């Protein structure tokens, strides 16, 4: 009994340490955002601002078009999530229900493609988008994010489809439903948690992505929020720390809100994809 209690206490201690490890950077960022310039330049910084101020937030909005950049990021992320889910859902259904060599090879390729680094992909993607005249276009960036999100979306949704009993689809077929109607009326409602988790992952990935947006979007009016945040860093690498921290806090809030709302569904989706995939 004591062994179980000690093991459980160790697990809780490890969990608390991991949560603290994740929370400390954001807490430090939040503290920095509310510090006046004098406290930011102090030799002995403190966790809690002694004289908290909103001046960094006002300065951030005055120096950079944060609202416009946030609007660009929101539209691109929503479009990428929607397209990724629409493409991944039927494809995951085929991969889960077709037990052929081609389906197994496609599943293996999905996993392998996740190992490709960004630098390896940016040149061919740039050439393709230039041929399509989609460089410096939000539509082109949406295409890139969809391609980048599809492997994970397929892996996740395939596990959800395999969790749906095939007997339900067979019963619908006996009642005269075709393949498309079965997918829409029977399978899709049962996949709702997985679809929601996949959409949110695709959204957060597109919202936070920086490298592709930096390379593919050149017009200032089209730049996304992560790119605009770099404008708070001068040519010599010196950052305007207070406004940068304030803008970073604002950029972090949407991701935290989405994860807080659907954390259980996201965890369930990961487990379903890992165990059944």
Image (cartoon, rainbow, N blue to C red):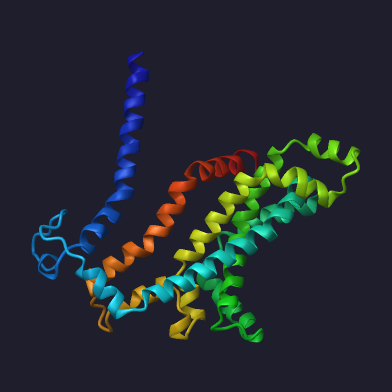
- Does residue 218 lie above or below 171 as drawn? below
Label count reads 0
Q: In the image, is 56 to the left or to the right of 144?
A: left
- Give the quadrant of the C terminus: top right
Residue 123 in sight in this render: yes
Q: In the image, is 47 to the left or to the right of 129?
A: left
Residue 111 in sight in this render: no
* Image location (x, y in percent) of residue 84: 63, 61
Q: Quadrant of residue 165?
A: top right
Report the residue at 34% width, 75% height from top. 230
* Image location (x, y in percent) of residue 218: 47, 85
- Quick one: which residue is furthest to the top in this view? 1
Report the residue at 79% width, 54% height from top. 102
* Image location (x, y in percent) of residue 214: 45, 77
- Does residue 94 lie above or below 145 as drawn? above
Report the residue at 47% width, 86% height from top. 219
Q: Nearer the viewer, residue 37 or 215?
A: 37
- Does residue 187 lie above or below 102 as drawn? above
* Image location (x, y in percent) of residue 256: 40, 53
Report the residue at 56% width, 79% height from top. 123
Q: Nearer the viewer, residue 77 or 163?
A: 77
Q: Nearer the viewer, residue 48 or 93?
A: 48
Q: In the image, is 95 to the left or to the right of 229?
A: right
- Does residue 135 lie above or below 5 as drawn? below
Q: Quadrant of residue 63?
A: bottom left
- Give the quadrant of the N terminus: top left
Q: In the image, is 155 to the left or to the right of 28?
A: right
């Amino acid at each position: 009994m004591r062994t179980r209690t000690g093991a459980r206490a160790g697990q809780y201690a490890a969990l608390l340490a991991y949560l603290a490890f994740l929370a400390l950077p954001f807490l430090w960022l939040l503290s920095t955002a509310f510090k006046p310039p004098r406290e930011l330049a102090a030799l002995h910084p403190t966790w809690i601002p002694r004289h908290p101020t909103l001046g960094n937030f006002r300065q951030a909005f005055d120096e950079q078009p944060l609202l416009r950049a946030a609007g660009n990021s929101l539209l691109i992320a929503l479009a990428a999530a929607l397209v990724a889910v629409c493409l991944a859902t039927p494809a995951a259904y085929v991969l889960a229900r077709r037990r052929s060599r081609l389906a197994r090879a496609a599943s293996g390729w999905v996993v392998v493609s996740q190992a490709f680094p960004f630098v390896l992909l940016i040149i061919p993607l740039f050439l393709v988008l230039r041929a399509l005249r989609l460089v410096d276009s939000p539509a082109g960036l949406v295409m890139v994010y969809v391609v980048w999100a599809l492997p994970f979306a397929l892996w996740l949704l395939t596990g959800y489809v395999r969790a749906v009993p095939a007997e339900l689809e067979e019963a619908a077929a006996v009642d005269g439903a075709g393949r498309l109607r079965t997918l829409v009326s029977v399978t899709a409602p049962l996949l709702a948690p997985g679809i929601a988790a996949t959409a949110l992952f695709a959204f957060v990935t597109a919202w936070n992505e920086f490298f592709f947006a930096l390379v593919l979007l050149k017009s200032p009016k089209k730049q996304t929020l992560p790119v605009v945040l770099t404008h708070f860093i001068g040519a010599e690498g010196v950052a305007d720390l207070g406004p940068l921290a304030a803008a970073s806090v604002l950029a972090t809030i949407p991701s935290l809100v989405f994860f807080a709302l659907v954390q259980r569904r996201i965890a369930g989706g990961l487990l379903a994809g890992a165990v059944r995939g």
